[in-house]
Each structure stands twice: as structure tokens, then as C-alpha cells.
Amino acid sequence: MYFGADYYPEHWPRERWEADAQMMQAAHINVVRLAEFAWSKLEPTEGHYDFAWLDEAIDILNQHGIQVIIGTPTATPPKWLIDKYPDILPVDADGHVRGFGSRCHYCATNKNYHWHSDLIVGQLAKHYGHHPGVIGWQTDNEFGCHSTTRCYCDSCRKAFRQWLQQKYGTLEALNEAWGTVFWSQTYETWDQVIIPRKTVASHNPSLLLDFYRFSSDMKVEFQARQLRILRQHSTNQFITHNLMGLFPEIDYYDLAKDLDFVSWDNYPRYSGAPDSTRLALSHDLMRGIRKQNFWVMEEQSGPSGWEIVHSTPRPGEIRLWTYQAVSRGADGIVYFRWRTCRFGTEEYWHGIIDHDGRPRRRYREIQETGKELAELWPFLDGTEVKNDVAILYSYDQLWSLQIQPNNPSLQYTEIVKEYYKRLHELNIGVDLVNHTDEFTDYKILIAPLLYLMTPELALRLTKFVESGGILVTTFRSGVKNWDNVVTDKTLPGELSELIGVEIEEYDSIYGETPIGISMELQGYKVEGTASTWCDVIIPGTADTLAKYTTEYYAGQTAITQNSLGKGKAIYVGTRLDANLTARLMDHVLTLAGVARGPLAETGIEVSIRGKAGMRLLFLLNHSGKKQTVDLTQHYVDPLTDVPITGRLELPAYGVEVLREV
């Protein structure tokens, strides 16, 4: 098990490094990440490189059994570089240059920046690519953070036009795809094509979606430059990047495609009390991006904050968050940061130890957690997370609904989370998948808000259902083609035959009294409410599962179920309250023959990792109170083989790991 910390030796006197390494070793830390913000220290002036300090820090760490991950320092271009090439700085949608003084102050399409970032990455790769104590690389840091994915500079305008030429081939094709005849926006030459800086009203939604896609692609291409250089000069070293969970600006499926594995940065108490469901969803997305185990490259170890200090992790929470990550597929945990910095923007983003460098409660909690995980690793090694249920999570759908949310309260990720929440309550594992992935491994596919649709995707969804799968999709599906243009087919467009309905009309709900819903499932009725959006549905081949009970469409169909081949497609024409969502999901699970997970609805989160002949259950108490549960199966302690049956008590923020027998 890789268990570590993010370390910044350049922030501390050389005399302290040995003491830090000793304390890390005592805490069972065996890996650190270094140098991801140290460009000015590594290249103080153009072309003059100083790696001696980093060599020495790595040597000290290696002597204490601590291996190293080096971050390429391209998130913080130094002042000398910005002074020489001020065009490196990004430009916002208002046309204003975003200046030097923070981080991520670069444009990913700038040729001058490409040249110099290639040089520093190349020098590092040549120097450390065969170092026995360096096990891997992290590219840059948190691509796109601080809203830096989308740049509106002249370099991006030129690159955007080239990207569009490659995609559409001709201006005629672009004008047709975007519908530029509207508002006299037809382009006659490629030089006329704009980048969507602020204008007097809203931009063409097709242009915006392509710009979002282009901006994501530019981060992917910028990373690809680094990947080529690192792989050219290194041997037996992995390459990863620290993603940001549910960050919406970059298509993480694309960004992660050529990495060895995904890492991500997890700060549960960044603002307010932790949301265990959102944390679980984030872990599942990170695992789902490459369909493999992952790392947490920055795990919260203290109160976070720059100008504002957020709340401190409660005793047991750091251990709890660590085990939640491990339970959902993390093979490496790296805490941010080792020691809290005394200067700079992150003075109050606390680490394992405080400003004075003395170990306290948080250090001791991590020390004990490291000891436990080292003992558990022989059982964890080689285990995976396998599930029967998937949620389709698509950045194209997310972006198109950011551009035109249709209703002020409609947010793509929040709707996804509402369906995920019931599965989380029932301790049913979920994989998040892309629209290009295979669905055949799953019994249930939940695909909310399929706003953009193609005939090819509709066909793949149809084949999934015909083969016996249960599909759940929702309102605002099949509305547009992949160019973000509304279909001329009766809604739900390309999905009409699969779902077996027509949408007569729809109603966008603006904070008025919720709409009444009556749902009948398998012989029982449940009443509830709906909000945000209401499709008025005319069933064709589909059966009605629920009707509206208020508004002018009272008595009209709200939810349907269509049988097709061996499976069924369920269409939810509105946003259901939590209880109705739960009851509908229970119905779906019954249809698919998917059982509830262990300790369902007890408030204890249970995740499972397994391999041939062995399964480990992780029981997590996210409550600040003691909880008692009754085990219905026989388990043993994986380390001692002592039987664990009957009643089990978990303290506040407690964790228990069990092995099935």
C-alpha cells in the first residue's frame, strides 16, 4: 500500500529535512510527492537548472524507505518567463489578462509556453527518469483549477479555428451544424469565426459547446506533450494526474486515457460538514474513468483554507476518509500536506503537522492508520470493485446543460446524485461510465438527462435493453443532436421507440407549489411531489407507472415503463422528491434482480473489494455518534481470523474491515 504525504522541502531549512523524514518513517509513510510548484527553484533563470537541492531531499527520503513522485512544475510558470513572454498569461471572457501572482497563470495553447514547459519537463525526465528512488510522475497540478480551463486569448482564438477546421472540414458544414443563419451569424471565412468572449446577450449554444469541448481538448493535448517527454526518458515509472472529483470543466475520460492510473484530490471538509454521498460518488467517478483502481494524491489532513479557515477534521475523520477511499478502489493515499506552510497563499491550508512542526493528534491518527493499512495490504493487494449497476455520466451532457439549463434549479450532477443517493443508502455499488463505454456488463443503467443524442447511442441503449438490461432515463432526454441543435422529431426524439412514449408538452416549474404525483408500483401506491420540470407524456407501447395529481395536467402520465426484448426502459418525466425516487429505484432493483447491499438503510456505509475466493467488507460510520448494527452473515477479522458475528458497535467516525467466510 502506498501511504504518503505531499512534501515541500524547499519551504523549510535544509537542517529540518532529516527530522521530517524520520517523522514520516515513524508514521509509516512510504511515498511523497515533490516539486509540483517548484519551477523557480529548479530553473532560477532561463536555461540554468538547479536540481542539487531536490537530489539531496530525495536522497534523505530514500534513506528512510520513502519513495518519490515528482510533479512537473508547469502549474507555476516563474516570473522571469512571464516577463519575457507576457502572452503566456490567460485571458478571461471579458478580454482581461489574468496576471501573475497566483498559479495556473498560463494558456495551454501558447507556443512560447509549450517550448519552455517542454524544456523543464525534459530536463527533469532526463535527470530522474531512471532514478531508483523515483517511482512516478504527476503531470502539472489540478488542470483547470480556478476556472482556468477556458482561455479567450488570441492564441486560443487561432487554435479554436484550427480545431473547428479539423472537425467540420468546411465553413459550410460549420454554418449548417451551428445554425448560424440565426441572428445573421453566418461566417464567410475562417478568420471571421469568433471565440466566445462576453457579448451583449447569449452566444450560439452550438458554438459554446464546441468551445467547451475545444478547451478541454487543449488541456488534454498539453498533458500529452508531457506524457511523450516523460515516457521517452523514463523507465518503470508511472504517470498520473491529480484530478478534482466532480470538477465540470474537463472531460476526465479524455484526460485520463493515456495515464497509467487516475489520482484525485479529496477535501471532505473544504466547506461545511462532509457529504458522504458526494464523496462516494466522486470516488466512484474516479474509479470509473479508467475502470481501474486509483490513488488519492491529496487527502485532507487538517483544516483547509486560504483567507478563510474551514473546520478541523474531527477525531477519527481522517482515518474514516482514508478507508472510504480505499474501500472504493484507492491503492494509494497521499495526505496534503506534510507540514503547514508559514508563508504564501496557503498559510492556513493545514497539513499533518502544524506550523511549528510538532506532531499532535492528526499526526497520531495518520500514524495509526498507516500501521493498519500496512497490515491489511496483503489482503487488499489485487482486489477490485465490481458492480451490477452503472450511471452514465457524460461531460457533453453536463456542458450542454450548463449552457442551457432549461430551469434555474436544474444541475446535471445534482440530478445524477439524486439517483445515486438511493443506491448509496442501500450500499449497492455503482460504476460511473461514459457514453462511449460498453454497457453490457451491467444489469441496470441509470442515464439521467440524455439531453444530447445520436442514432448510434440510441441504438446501443436499445441493444442494452433488448439483451435484458434495465434502463432508467429522465426528462430532457433526446432533445438535441450532438451539435447542440434541437431535434425536429417528436420528443424524446431518437429515444422514442426505445421508451415507447411521446411528449405532448412540458412545463418548467419556477419555485411554485410542488406538483403532486401518484405512483403505483407492483400493487402498492405512493403519493409524493415533483419539481423543476414536468413532461406531459402520451404512452405508446409503454405502461404508466405514475400520474400527476395537480396542475392542468392532473391525471396525465408522469413515469412510464416500456418492455423491449428481455429488458425494460423506464422514463421519468419529472424531478421526483427523495421518497418517490427511492421507491422507484427499489422497483428498478427488483426488476433487475439486484439485491440490497449489507446493512442497507442502517446509516452505515458498506463497500466491498474482492478477488478470487475473498471479499473484504468496509463498514464506515460517517456519524459523529456511536452506531450499533446487527450482522446477518458470518465474518472474520482479516488479520486474526477471529469470528465476528451478531451485534457490532462502531464508534463515532468508526471503521471496521471484515472478511467474508
Image (spheres, helix red, strand yellow):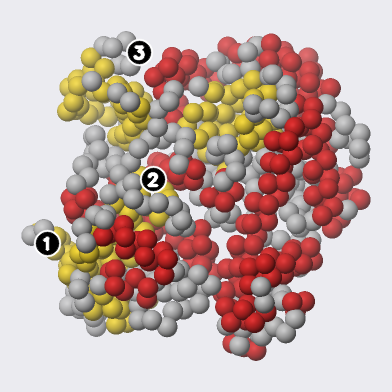
Disc with the residue nearer the chain's start (3 vs 2): 2
**Amino acid at pointer 1:** Lys
**Amino acid at pointer 3:** Leu
Residue at 50% of width from left, 19% of height from top? 370
Looking at the image, residue 374 lies above or below residue 153: above
Residue at 21% of width from left, 50% of height from top? 592
Residue at 50% of width from left, 77% of height from top? 485
**Amino acid at pointer 2:** Asp
Residue at 30% of width from left, 78% of height from top? 503
Q: Position of residue 321 (x, y in %)?
A: 45, 32
Tag 2 residue: 431
Disc with the residue nearer the chain's start (1 vs 2): 2
Tag 3 residue: 639
Q: Quadrant of residue 523?
A: bottom left
Disc with the residue nearer the chain's start (3 vs 1): 1
Q: Secondary structure at mark 3?
A: loop
Q: CA distance from mark 3 to mark 1?
A: 48 Å
Q: Secondary structure at mark 1?
A: strand
Residues under numbered marks 3 and 2 in contact, where contact means CB atoms less than 8 Å apart: no
